[in-house]
């Protein structure tokens, strides 16, 4: 018959609240002293203060509830006062003398060291991940700034609003005081219907084709920009009202050449002319006038040009 | 036209305004400073779900309300040997702090719950959600004793009496005036020990999500096991619990209390119970013949008897 003293594992029996009833020889090798000395003492005395708290707040409640606890990691106070890391299994058991807890302790020095390393590595990885996230955020911000700074519209390849602003500022700086300029605001008629009836890819296709026509017909000094969803702006330096009206006619022709599943494409055009000015709101006022003209063109039944007065 | 707009505004704004006033009244009554009006208002249903609130109703409406608050490392299940003794005599309210038991882990805010204040708010939220305004007999174990005391300072009208099982206002020794039982490095060792004990848990070793706030990556379901607590949240709760020092607040408590101390408690030496008894106005100290820290689990009959005597419910 195997005796507990022969089992190569530290074992102990306590009452339900942890008073020591029995200990095997292997256990005494770990903690020192004799069994007679420890009898009746609380097992708390075998534990480091931290382990005592963990035992009282986690281990004993678990034993009360589940009647057993497995692989609990604790620190014992060793024979020379050193800390002994142990894995603990415990079960609540009814023995002949009443309710008890049977404990088994496995010394886990290597495992403890290895886990310590793992925890440290995890903390480092967490820190690294946070730094990575921070620098990703930085890159994203810079990307956003870059795209704001970029000058072309990704869908049509035309210039964008910002390019228009820069061009106008440049013109204001360099053109002579007698120079005049015209601005066409072009809005595709019933564009929403194209999208709704045939989907956004078809809408995009119409915009791209129309943009290609506009760009092909532009003079070198003109600027063609996509201003908004289905709105385009033609910036026409040195074009007076008459020249601009001719260009507007060409714009209507460009629209008619675009083929759409939704039928013929037409546009409404607002035309505004101005002589050179230096103010910061020069472009804004020109845009406002041409925009109002587009509105009137829409009100007149679309597919026409209205000249702003 | 203008009149119409005004009327519409009235129609839509009035309920909000009424609600805002109701909130303001609550806040004024509770004496909360620094009102943050941008704080999302939580509904009763949300709080009940967030804190996994359970109510054991008595049939008669005019009986006392017992609100139980669990200690560190556990959940409301720890009260299951106590509640049967009060069935029918009291309404009983049980809940889990956010981050513990079956609470909604997604609601865990690592900043809010890094101090006891966050847990005090949970307790007050639960009472508010149930429409309880006064007369609460509070039963708190361990750190929840401190949480209940702090809540009673914030809202004295809400509480009638406080029953404190194994309380300690401060676990750290401040020799020579105060002996909490532990040195700071002991408690730091506890946090390391928790790391080592919970490291096998899946969520602890789950992939680290770059940039995701801690709590978000921990939103999963916990296992059903008793004392199941997410390791990261448990660590934050442990820090809040074991490094708290509420000694200064004790003299501000105005509600009467019963201190149930364990005769032999590794977490709270005798001197701690005596200290609390001295500082808490209108307190009763009763030492239970119990070894350990969870008399309500190991010796529930002693705890229920003491509660019944104190509340005159025998």
Image (cartoon, rainbow, N blue to C red):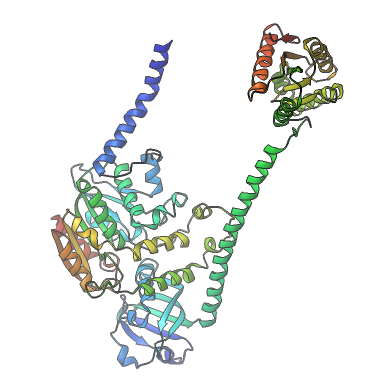
Residue A285, how many percent across, how many down? 64, 18
- Residue A179 position by quadrant: top right
Question: In the figure, B115 relative to A34: above or below?
Answer: above
Is residue B305 shown left or right of residue B101?
A: left
Q: Residue at x 67, y 9 (%)?
A: A296
Depth check: B182 or B165 in front?
Answer: B182
Is residue A99 shown left or right of residue B195?
A: left
Depth check: B294 or A235 in front?
Answer: A235
Is residue A16 shown left or right of residue A184?
A: left
Q: Across the whole image, how many numbered discs are drawn on residues?
A: 0
Residue A92 visible in the shown view: no
Quadrant location of the N terminus of chain A? bottom left
Question: In the figure, B233 relative to B191: above or below?
Answer: above
Residue A157, how many percent across, how many down? 79, 32
Quadrant location of the C terminus of chain A? top right
Question: In the figure, A15 relative to B172: above or below?
Answer: below
Residue A140 visible in the shown view: yes
Q: Residue furthest top?
A: A300
Residue B263, how many percent across, how many down? 22, 73
Question: In the figure, A187 relative to B55: above or below?
Answer: above
Residue A177, how many percent across, how many down? 74, 19
- Residue A123 position by quadrant: bottom right
Depth check: A278 or B245 in front?
Answer: A278
Depth check: A192 or A179 in front?
Answer: A179
């Amino acid at each position: 018959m195997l005796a507990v003293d022969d089992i190569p594992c530290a074992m102990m029996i306590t009452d339900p609240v942890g008073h020591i009833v029995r200990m095997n020889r292997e256990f005494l090798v770990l903690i020192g002293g004799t069994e007679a000395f420890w009898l009746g003492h609380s097992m708390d005395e075998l534990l480091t203060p931290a382990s005592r708290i963990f035992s009282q707040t986690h281990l004993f409640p678990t034993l009360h509830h589940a009647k057993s606890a497995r692989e609990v990691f604790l620190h014992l106070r060793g024979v020379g006062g050193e800390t002994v890391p142990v894995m603990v299994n415990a079960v609540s058991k009814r023995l002949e003398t009443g309710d008890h807890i049977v404990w088994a302790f496995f010394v886990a020095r290597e495992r403890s060291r290895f886990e310590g390393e793992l925890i440290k590595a995890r903390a480092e990885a967490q820190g690294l991940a946070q730094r990575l996230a921070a620098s990703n955020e930085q890159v994203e911000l810079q990307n956003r700034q870059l795209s704001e700074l970029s000058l072309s519209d990704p869908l049509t390849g035309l210039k964008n609003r910002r390019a228009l602003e820069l061009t106008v500022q440049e013109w204001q700086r360099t053109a002579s005081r007698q120079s005049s300029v015209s601005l066409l605001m072009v809005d595709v008629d019933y564009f929403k219907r194209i999208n709704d009836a045939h989907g956004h890819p078809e809408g995009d296709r119409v915009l791209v084709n129309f943009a290609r026509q506009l760009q092909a017909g532009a003079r070198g000094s003109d600027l063609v920009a996509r201003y908004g969803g289905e709105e385009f702006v033609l910036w026409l330096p040195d074009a007076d009202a008459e020249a601009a009206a001719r260009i507007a006619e060409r714009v209507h022709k460009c629209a008619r050449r675009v083929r759409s599943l939704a039928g013929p494409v037409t546009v409404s055009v607002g035309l505004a002319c101005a002589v050179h000015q230096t103010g910061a709101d020069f472009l804004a006022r020109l845009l406002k006038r041409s925009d109002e003209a587009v509105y009137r063109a829409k009100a007149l039944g679309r597919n026409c040009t209205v000249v702003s007065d | 036209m203008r009149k119409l707009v005004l009327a519409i505004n009235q129609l839509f704004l009035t309920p909000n305004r009424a609600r805002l006033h109701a909130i303001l009244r609550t806040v004024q009554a509770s004496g909360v400073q620094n009102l943050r009006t941008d704080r999302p208002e939580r509904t009763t249903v949300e709080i009940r779900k967030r804190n996994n609130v359970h109510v054991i109703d008595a049939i008669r409406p005019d009986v006392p309300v017992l609100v139980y608050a669990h200690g560190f490392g556990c959940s409301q299940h720890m009260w299951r040997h106590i509640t049967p003794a009060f069935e029918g005599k009291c309404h009983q309210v049980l809940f889990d702090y956010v981050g513990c038991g079956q609470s909604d882990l997604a609601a865990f805010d690592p900043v809010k719950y890094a101090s006891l204040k966050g847990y005090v708010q949970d307790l007050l939220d639960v009472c508010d959600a149930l429409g309880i305004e006064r007369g609460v007999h509070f039963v708190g174990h361990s750190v929840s004793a401190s949480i209940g005391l702090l809540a009673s300072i914030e809202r004295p009208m809400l509480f009638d009496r406080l029953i404190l099982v194994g309380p300690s206002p401060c676990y750290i020794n401040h020799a020579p005036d105060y002996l909490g039982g532990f040195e700071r490095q002991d408690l730091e060792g506890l946090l390391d020990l928790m790391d080592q004990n919970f490291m096998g848990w899946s969520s602890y070793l789950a992939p680290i999500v770059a940039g995701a706030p801690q709590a978000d990556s921990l939103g999963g379901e916990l296992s059903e096991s008793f004392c199941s607590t997410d390791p990261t949240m448990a660590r934050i709760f442990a820090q809040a619990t074991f490094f708290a020092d509420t000694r200064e607040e004790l003299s501000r408590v105005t509600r009467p209390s019963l201190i149930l101390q364990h005769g032999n408690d590794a977490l709270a030496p005798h001197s701690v119970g005596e200290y609390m008894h001295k500082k808490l106005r209108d307190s009763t100290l009763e030492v239970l013949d119990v070894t350990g820290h969870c008399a309500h689990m190991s010796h529930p009959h002693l705890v229920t008897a003491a509660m019944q005597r104190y509340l005159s419910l025998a």
